[in-house]
Amino acid sequence: MVAGAARKVFLIVDPLPAHVAAAVQDWVWEQGERIELFTLPVKTPERNPVEYLNNDLKTNVYATGLPKDRQELRAKLEQFMHNLASFPERIMNYFRHPMIQYAAAGVV
């Protein structure tokens, strides 16, 4: 992510142990000019833009019923994400929720 970025990356992460691990924090500190992490408080999914994507994805993937196997689940997930890429306005709507305004960066 950092390698292809034209400017500094500001990344919002949840407090998953992997995100706050010492090795990760050390690497981020070494790359300070290229990336900065902002860790969300514990148990605040309403402040995590990814949760809005997750809800949208689950609603759409399960709309026609539960997948019969892993292959069907994967196919439905990939199809949803592929289609979503064609609708940037839908993605921007995740950031229009009042609890996500802090991350909107000019989206709204």
Image (tube, rainbow, N blue to C red):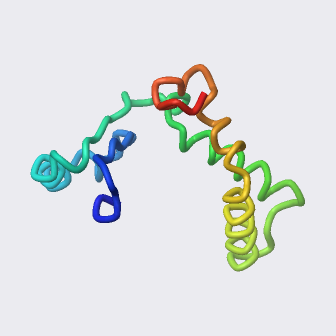
Q: Residue at x 67, y 48 (%)?
A: 88
- Please name whichever residue, 104 or 64, is drawn nearer the observer in this view of the structure: 104
- Please name whichever residue, 92 or 106, is drawn nearer the observer in this view of the structure: 106
* Relative image position of residue 60 (x, y in whole percent): 79, 53
Q: Is residue 14 left or right of residue 101?
A: left
Furthest-bottom residue in view?
71
Furthest-top residue in view?
98
Q: Residue at x 74, y 76 (%)?
A: 69
88 up-or-down from 100: above or below: below
Count of marks placed on residues: 0
Q: Is residue 79 left or right of residue 31?
A: right
Q: Is residue 51 left or right of residue 82?
A: left
50 up-or-down from 64: above or below: above
Residue 37, quarter of picture: top left
Quadrant where the N terminus sits is bottom left
Furthest-right residue in view?
64
* Relative image position of residue 90 (x, y in whole percent): 71, 43
Q: Residue at x 79, y 68 (%)?
A: 67
Residue 94, quarter of picture: top right
Quadrant where the C terminus sits is top right
Q: Residue at x 74, y 68 (%)?
A: 79
* Relative image position of residue 34 (x, y in whole percent): 22, 50
Q: Is residue 37 left or right of residue 46?
A: left
